[in-house]
């Protein structure tokens, strides 16, 4: 037995063994455990947790030291047994014996009490820090060794984007579908190389290929959740162009950094420059310097002049904003005028930097900067003819605005885009425009018939699917603006339903916020002052009174809002808009889907009669809200997008929502039905089915609209003249051989022609009945009519559920008879001088007087607005 096991004899019945309940040396047998009543020594096993514990084997072995006892307790006894075995009642936690075997990572720390056990030692902190740094070094080394140098030829693969009709059949495949041409460095002009160096990376020939500060900014921005920023060196941009994944993640950033470092040390600078210029995106679907030279200047890259090189180098900052042809369909800030200014400004700056960096001699600089080298205009690509070009344009914008896909990524191809467009309806809409154009316009012989444009769209109510559009004459004819999804064309009196809806919902200051009835009366006379709620009048800038005008000077007197809508009379709706509050009119329009960016910023009196400029798509979608009894659904043109066989997220169908009370929407529909039956939209009666709509004509006859709907389809048609040079609107006075074009004339005829074909074979579900709504709150100052003795006075109009002539009541206005569906008013029939005209029974020939929806507005007149595309601030979002 070892020395530490030899113990001196212990007195009987006492000593440490007795206190522990262990047998003494002279016992000859195990002592009974404490508290045991005749049980064997094995009955204590419930307190024994390990092979070295007392009583576990009944062999009578004892511990030779406190250290061994404590080690045994630590191995299996736990705090309870340690406390039981401790001398003098002291537990294990108070044992002051020598420490146990040290651990590799001493945490929590042994031998420390309380919070000190959880404070790491300086050795642990130092060791972990060194280990972390060492791991990073190893990871960086491994990363550097594993990444490969990108090959621009592998990035040159170009694929088609394939678009499909709503029924799943293929519409068109866009793109070349072939490898683009990569040039050797000797075929790329020195001026092009120096242009990008002076503009983007002056230290290109000296740096290692990585900008640490640029990477730090990008990582910090990503950590904050903001927009990422790419590396600033040409080497890093080359790597980014050829690196297949464009995800803005930390992993991609670190991989890009390693590749850039390797490229900077392994490749010659000429190879890097060649790769960068061969893989960069220049806009208009052009990847690589050779494609850009052909696209913008129709020549090979080696023939580019220094001045042209500077223009192409400017495109690398962002072709959406630096292509002088403009990209307003993609972003409202990328108009032709704004892009041209940006392009010319950066072109001049790049040439100046090249001259400053001694890359352009004095004489060459003076020659290059003397005249801006105008690039060629856009060209139609294979398959992009007719309306296909505009549908592809609309769908592309929808994809970019509803995903993380950039325009450059999208134009690389490989996407399958499934659209909502229905071929039969698209063909019907295009045919309707062409038929009316051919029958009414002759631009070859009549000056006023030149430059006439049409834009139209058709949307499914309570769904938002765009099933048809008309964007213009086609890319192949040089018309690259999508008239169905662009802004800039005032909508005129088609805005008045929003004023009426707001009045029915929110009331006027005169009704104390209580919704008013469409039978409320307002003064419809011409040349009226507009009264503010405080009783004062609107003034012009010279402090003269502002007068609102109608198209004609017919003395309508006080007429119902229903009648004023029927004949599209301006003065009642201008005053009503002021009484309701133009901000509430704006909110009502916005609730139906009109975008804020397309609304006139100045909420002056003329705001009520259509100074705003929504797109045709948005107007069709907005009126669809009335058609669906107040349910609004955002317009959409794409149902699904696939890449590499995988469906991409974010293209679920927008959900409809109730944005106004159904009774308000149904009453607007009832009033707009009367516009077609008895008012300025009578040309639409030949459709032969239940329909509602509103005409609109604007100041100086620069635009004319008709927006109408059934329960199945909502369609808008816009007509305008545009100067092809500066895209400013021209007056249509004299167009089609008439004094002026009204919304009830050619636009209504196009609408009717299309709707007849689009709804052929469909049933006529009509509209829900309009229940009586609101109370009659006439304009302040309206006289109370005195009834004739033969007529029984009634405080409210007589209701009628079937078409019949109404009784008349003395009124300052004419008293012709009127046919009505629900509300029968005392204003009579269609009288002369409707502000939109077009009350002729002929579907295609109406010369009735009456336009001027925004006529005579003085300094409170129309104000331009931006935006208005399908997708909001970026026209086409």
Image (cartoon, rainbow, N blue to C red):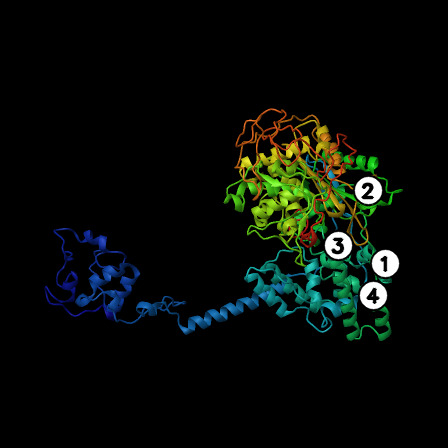
Tag nearer the camera, 4 or 3? 4
Secondary structure of the residue carrying numbered label 2: helix
The residue tagged 3 is 156
Cα separation between marks 3 and 1? 18 Å
Cα separation between marks 3 and 2? 51 Å
CB contact under 8 Å: marks 3 and 2: no
Tag nearer the camera, 4 or 1? 4
Q: Quadrant of residue 55?
A: bottom left
Q: Nearer the viewer, residue 761 or 383?
A: 761
As drawn, the label of residue 749 is: none
As drawn, the label of residue 300 is: 1
Cα separation between marks 4 and 3? 27 Å
Q: Label 4: how many residues lie within 10 Å, few (<14), some (14-19) or many (20+)?
A: many
Q: Nearer the viewer, residue 349 or 472?
A: 472
Residue 661 horizontal/vertical position (percent):
53, 38
The residue tagged 2 is 735
Q: Quadrant of residue 697?
A: top right
Answer with mark 3 or mark 2, whichever residue precedes in sequence.
3
Residue 192 horizontal/vertical position (percent):
80, 65
Answer with mark 4 or mark 3, whichever residue precedes in sequence.
3
Answer with mark 2 or mark 4, whichever residue precedes in sequence.
4
Secondary structure of the residue carrying numbered label 4: helix
511 vs 21: above or below? above
Answer with mark 3 or mark 1, whichever residue precedes in sequence.
3
């Amino acid at each position: 037995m070892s020395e530490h096991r030899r113990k001196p004899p212990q007195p009987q019945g006492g000593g440490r063994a007795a206190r522990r309940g262990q047998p003494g040396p002279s016992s000859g047998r195990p002592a009974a455990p404490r508290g045991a009543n005749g049980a064997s020594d094995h009955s204590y096993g419930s307190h024994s947790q390990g092979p070295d514990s007392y009583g576990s084997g009944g062999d009578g072995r004892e511990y030779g030291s406190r250290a061994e006892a404590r080690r045994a307790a630590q191995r299996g006894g736990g705090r309870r047994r340690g406390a039981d075995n401790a001398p003098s009642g002291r537990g294990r936690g108070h044992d002051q014996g020598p420490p146990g075997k040290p651990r590799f990572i001493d945490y929590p720390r042994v031998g420390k009490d309380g919070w000190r056990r959880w404070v790491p030692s300086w050795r642990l902190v130092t060791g972990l820090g060194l280990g972390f740094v060492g791991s990073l070094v190893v990871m960086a080394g491994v990363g550097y060794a594993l990444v490969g140098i990108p090959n621009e030829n592998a990035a040159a693969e170009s694929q088609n984007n394939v678009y499909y009709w709503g029924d799943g059949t293929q519409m068109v495949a866009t793109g070349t579908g072939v490898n683009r041409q990569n040039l050797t460095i000797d075929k790329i002009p020195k001026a092009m190389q120096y242009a990008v160096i002076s503009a983007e990376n002056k230290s290109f020939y000296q740096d290692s290929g990585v900008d640490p500060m640029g990477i730090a900014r990008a990582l910090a921005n990503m950590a904050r959740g903001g927009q990422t920023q790419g590396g600033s060196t040409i080497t890093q941009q080359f790597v980014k162009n050829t690196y297949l994944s464009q995800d803005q993640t930390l992993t991609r950033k670190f991989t890009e950094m390693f590749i850039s470092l390797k490229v900077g040390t392994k490749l010659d600078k000429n190879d890097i420059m060649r790769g960068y210029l061969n893989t960069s995106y220049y806009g208009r679907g052009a990847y690589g310097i050779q494609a850009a030279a052909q696209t913008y200047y129709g020549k090979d890259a080696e023939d580019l002049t220094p001045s042209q090189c500077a223009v192409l180098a400017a495109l690398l900052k962002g072709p959406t904003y630096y292509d002088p042809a403009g990209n307003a369909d993609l972003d409202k800030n990328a108009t032709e005028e704004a892009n041209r200014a940006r392009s010319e400004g950066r072109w001049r700056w790049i040439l100046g930097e090249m001259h400053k960096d001694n890359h352009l001699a004095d004489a060459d600089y003076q020659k290059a900067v003397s005249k801006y080298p105008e690039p060629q205009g856009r060209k139609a690509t294979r398959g992009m003819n007719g309306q296909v070009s505009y549908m592809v344009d609309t769908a592309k914008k929808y994809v970019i605005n509803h995903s993380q896909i950039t325009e450059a990524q999208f134009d690389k191809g490989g996407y399958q885009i499934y659209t909502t467009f229905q071929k039969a309806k698209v063909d019907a809409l295009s045919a309707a425009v062409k038929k009316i154009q051919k029958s009414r316009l002759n631009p070859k012989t009549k000056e006023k018939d030149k430059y006439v444009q049409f834009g139209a769209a058709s949307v499914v109510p309570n769904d938002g699917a765009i099933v048809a559009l008309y964007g213009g004459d086609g890319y192949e004819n040089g018309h690259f603006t999508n008239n169905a999804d662009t802004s800039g064309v005032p909508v005129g009196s088609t805005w008045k339903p929003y004023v009426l809806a707001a009045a029915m919902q929110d009331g006027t200051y005169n009704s104390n916020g209580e919704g008013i009835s469409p039978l409320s009366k307002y003064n419809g006379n011409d040349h009226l002052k507009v009264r503010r709620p405080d009783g004062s009048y609107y003034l012009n800038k010279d402090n003269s009174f502002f007068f609102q005008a109608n198209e004609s000077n017919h003395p309508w007197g006080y007429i119902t809002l229903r009648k004023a809508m029927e004949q599209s009379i301006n003065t009642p709706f201008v005053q009503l808009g002021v009484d309701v509050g133009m901000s509430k009119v704006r909110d009502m329009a916005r609730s139906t889907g009109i975008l804020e960016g397309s609304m006139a910023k100045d909420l002056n009196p003329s705001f009520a009669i259509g100074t705003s400029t929504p797109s045709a798509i948005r107007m069709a979608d907005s009126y669809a809200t009335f058609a669906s009894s107040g349910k609004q659904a955002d317009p959409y043109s794409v149902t699904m997008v696939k890449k590499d066989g995988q469906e991409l997220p974010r293209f679920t169908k927008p959900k409809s929502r109730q944005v106004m009370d159904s009774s308000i929407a149904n009453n607007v529909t009832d009033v707009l039905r009367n516009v077609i039956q008895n008012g300025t939209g009578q040309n639409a009666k030949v459709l032969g089915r239940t329909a509602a709509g509103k005409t609109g004509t604007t100041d100086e006859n620069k635009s004319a609209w008709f927006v109408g709907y059934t329960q199945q389809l909502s369609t808008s048609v816009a007509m305008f003249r545009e100067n092809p040079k500066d895209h400013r609107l021209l007056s249509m006075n004299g167009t089609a051989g008439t004094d002026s074009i009204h919304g009830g004339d050619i636009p209504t005829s196009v609408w009717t022609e299309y709707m007849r074909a689009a709804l052929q074979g469909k049933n006529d579900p009509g509209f829900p009945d309009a229940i009586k709504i609101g109370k009659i709150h006439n304009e302040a100052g309206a006289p109370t009519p005195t009834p004739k003795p033969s007529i029984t006075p009634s405080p409210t109009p007589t209701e009628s559920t079937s078409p019949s002539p109404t009784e008349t009541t003395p009124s300052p206005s004419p008293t012709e008879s009127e046919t009505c569906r629900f509300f029968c008013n005392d204003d009579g029939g269609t009288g002369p001088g409707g502000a939109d005209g077009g009350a002729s029974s002929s579907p295609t020939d109406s010369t009735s007087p009456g336009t001027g929806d925004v006529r005579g507005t003085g300094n409170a007149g129309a104000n331009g607005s931006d935006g208005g595309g399908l997708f909001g601030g970026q026209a086409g979002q």
